[in-house]
Image (tube, rainbow, N blue to C red):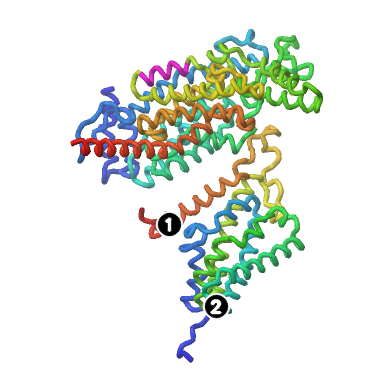
């Protein structure tokens, strides 16, 4: 550490006003304060400083995401070999290696491009580097499928940094969550890569292996049958839920107006629904999905860390879960189609619900600021997420849209919470003066 | 007669053409006529035909209103303007249907909606009612081209990145087939470009660039 400090101290004069690389000061400053406590002294205003500044907060969130990242790396490899039926030939190490080769480039691209855009803006505008992208840069890779082409990740990152952060004035001013905006951009711009059953699991064969019998069997170099391709391995939990509605509609069409058609069609949907993953599988996370979203265990570890350090908001998380359960119970009671019979726990563990709730709904900038507002905000995220999932088959995962929607609504919620508070206090004041 | 008769192409009058192109652009500065910029810019050809229709309607309406400006009773001036604009729009609609049927099908109701295009009513109210025919004519040209260039820029970007073609120039498949992902390449058309919201982002981009270049345009909060 002393060694690093010396280097930084030695380099500093070059970047100060009048120095050789004056133009690059924001860049230097960004790195120096990333490593060490900033040396700036407060010039005006309150003089109390917390040891935990913005950069430390960001680092805390990144550390909280590490379990998800590690699990995602393994799961990417595992899903790949599992779908090909090759888990016996390729053990855990191979799976981790395959996953790492897929995931780490996405992380690098996201960081390099995102920070590059931020540095560019900082140098152009001459203000110090803002560290807001540190978290977004890690979130973006965790919420896309491992196979997303890297240039798409780059384009989406540029779009979200420019149009969601820089336009509104940089870190702390964004009205939407930048990582989710990047994902929304990808989802609408390149739907084939971001949704559907072929997006989630890589089906490329390892070197030397080949397909036989119409692509259902995998052969090794010697032509021996070693694996059986799992035809439905690519479907996520949510698309399996979704398939039940399709099955019901198909059956209903097939039966026409026949007596009892509705009940039979409903049963056909339920049959389809029986092919979903077991609850424990989606809890552990050995299911296809975006890189970091599958494992509820890893997310809970991260959530525990966030709550322990006080960075994440427990209110948002709990009220989000409550909102989702509330909506699920309403649907279960109605039970109008097979999807509506899916239970609350299965909804909570499927797709990106937990990941979004823990890491993105709690984003302190775009979430509601008032304490009562946080509860309302979280509740509606959960509620809308389940509602979008069940009602709109075009968007299998409602979490992204639910959070973005509530991001936009957050200032409104805060406004009414504050107005309400003012009104209550005024009334109390009136009452008090009347009594005297 | 007044001593000096102002020439039609005097400096003051040329400003009427130049200003709307940049510093008082109807779309990016006055934020008028945004709806059509969102709706019909998926293809460059549609954007071009739309712009030409607006150009025709705006010039004719401005000139006609300017000619009869002293005869229009103030209380019913909006009705008179609407009648004039509606007549012109219906004429344009019929011409499009007769000569470029395909495009007119794609533009669908938006040709009819030129009637409600804020730019046209705005120019009639703000300029043609109070100015002579010559300046009104120039003002119409300026504003129509201010509208046109933004539509063309947005249309160009949306068509090239959204469908990889420029049908206006007979260019299909600007992106080689072998680049596409389904043929083993890496490229994929951007589906967002086919949705209306992206036009708003592109117009926002134009607004941003314009204000970054000319800081006087930035409004105070």
In the picture shown, does residue B174 fall above or below A255?
A: below
Question: What residue is at 46 percent from the left and 42 percent from the top?
Answer: A162
Highlighted range, magenta: A298-307
Asked which quadrant contains residue B50, the reply is bottom right
Determine crowd level at label 2: few under 14, some 14-19, many 20+ residues with C-alpha closer than 10 A: many
For label 2, the residue is: B69
Instruction: Looking at this view, name the residue that lies furthest to the top.
Output: A88
Going from N to C along the chain, the mark reached first, 1 or 2, is 2
User: Residue A1's quadrant in the figure?
Assistant: top left
Structural distance between the alpha carbons of marks 1 and 2:
38 Å
Residue named by callout 1:
B213
Question: Image quarter for residue A301?
Answer: top left
Residue at image position (58%, 17%) is A343
In this image, A326 relative to B190: left or right? left
On the image, the x and y values in percent for residue A230 come to 69, 16
Q: Is any part of residue A41 visible from this angle? A: no
User: What is the crowding at mark 1: few (fewer than 14 residues within 10 Å), some, or many (at least 20)?
Assistant: few
Per the image, label 2 sits on a secondary structure element best described as loop
- Chain of the residue displaying label 1: B
């Amino acid at each position: 550490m002393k060694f690093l400090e010396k280097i930084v101290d030695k380099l500093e004069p070059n970047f100060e006003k009048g120095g050789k690389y004056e133009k690059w000061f924001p860049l230097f400053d960004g790195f120096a304060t990333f490593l060490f406590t900033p040396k700036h002294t407060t010039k005006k205003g309150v003089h109390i400083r917390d040891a935990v500044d913005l950069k430390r907060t960001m680092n805390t969130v990144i550390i909280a995401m590490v379990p998800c990242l590690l699990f995602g790396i393994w799961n990417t490899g595992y899903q790949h070999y599992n779908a090909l039926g090759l888990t016996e030939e390729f053990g855990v190490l191979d799976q981790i290696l395959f996953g790492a080769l897929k995931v780490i480039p996405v992380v690098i691209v996201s960081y390099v491009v995102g920070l590059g855009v931020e540095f560019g803006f900082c140098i152009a505008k001459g203000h110090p580097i803002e560290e807001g992208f540190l978290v977004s840069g890690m979130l973006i890779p965790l919420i896309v499928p491992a196979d997303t082409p890297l240039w798409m990740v780059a384009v989406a990152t540029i779009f979200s940094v420019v149009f969601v952060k820089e336009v509104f004035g940089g870190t702390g001013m964004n009205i939407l969550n930048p990582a989710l905006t990047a994902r929304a951009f990808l989802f609408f711009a390149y739907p084939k890569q971001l949704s559907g059953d072929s997006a989630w699991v890589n089906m490329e064969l390892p070197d030397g292996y080949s397909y036989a019998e119409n692509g259902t069997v995998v052969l090794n170099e010697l032509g021996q049958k070693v694996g059986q391709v799992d035809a439905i391995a690519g479907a996520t939990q949510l698309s399996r839920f979704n398939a039940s509605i399709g099955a019901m509609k198909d059956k209903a069409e097939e039966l026409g107006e026949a007596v009892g058609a509705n009940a039979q069609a409903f049963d056909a949907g339920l049959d389809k629904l029986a092919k979903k993953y077991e609850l424990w599988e989606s809890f552990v996370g050995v299911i296809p999905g975006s890189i970091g979203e599958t494992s509820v265990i890893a997310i809970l570890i991260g959530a525990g860390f966030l709550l322990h350090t006080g960075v994440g908001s427990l209110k948002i998380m709990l009220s989000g879960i409550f909102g989702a359960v509330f909506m699920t119970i309403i649907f279960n009671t109605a039970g109008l189609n097979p999807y509506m019979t899916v239970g609350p726990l299965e909804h909570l563990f499927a797709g990106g619900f937990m990941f979004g709730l823990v890491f993105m709904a709690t984003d302190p900038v775009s979430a509601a600021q008032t304490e009562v507002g946080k509860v309302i905000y979280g509740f509606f995220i959960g509620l809308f997420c389940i509602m979008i999932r069940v009602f709109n088959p075009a968007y299998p995962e409602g979490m992204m849209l639910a959070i973005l929607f509530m991001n936009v609504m957050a200032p409104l919620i805060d406004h009414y919470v504050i107005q309400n508070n003012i009104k209550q206090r005024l009334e109390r004041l009136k009452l008090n003066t009347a009594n005297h | 007669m007044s001593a000096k008769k102002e020439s039609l192409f005097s400096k003051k009058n040329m400003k009427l053409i130049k200003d709307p192109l940049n510093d008082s652009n109807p779309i990016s500065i006055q934020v008028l006529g945004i709806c059509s910029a969102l709706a019909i810019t998926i293809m460059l050809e549609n954007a071009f035909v739309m712009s030409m229709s607006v150009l025709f309607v705006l010039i004719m309406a401005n000139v006609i209103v300017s000619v009869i400006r002293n005869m229009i009773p103030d209380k019913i001036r909006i009705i008179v303007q609407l009648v004039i604009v509606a007549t012109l729009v219906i004429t344009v609609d019929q011409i499009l249907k007769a000569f470029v049927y395909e495009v007119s099908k794609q533009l669908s109701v938006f040709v009819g909606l030129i009637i409600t295009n804020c730019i046209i009513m705005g120019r009639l109210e703000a300029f043609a009612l109070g100015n002579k025919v010559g300046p009104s004519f120039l003002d119409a040209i300026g504003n129509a081209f201010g509208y046109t260039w933004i539509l063309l820029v947005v249309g160009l970007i949306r068509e090239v990145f959204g469908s990889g073609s420029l049908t206006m120039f007979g260019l299909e498949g600007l992106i080689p087939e072998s680049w596409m992902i389904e043929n083993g390449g890496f490229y994929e058309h951007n589906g967002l470009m086919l949705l209306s919201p992206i036009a708003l982002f592109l117009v926002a981009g134009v607004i941003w660039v314009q204000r970054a270049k000319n800081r006087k345009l930035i409004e105070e909060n």
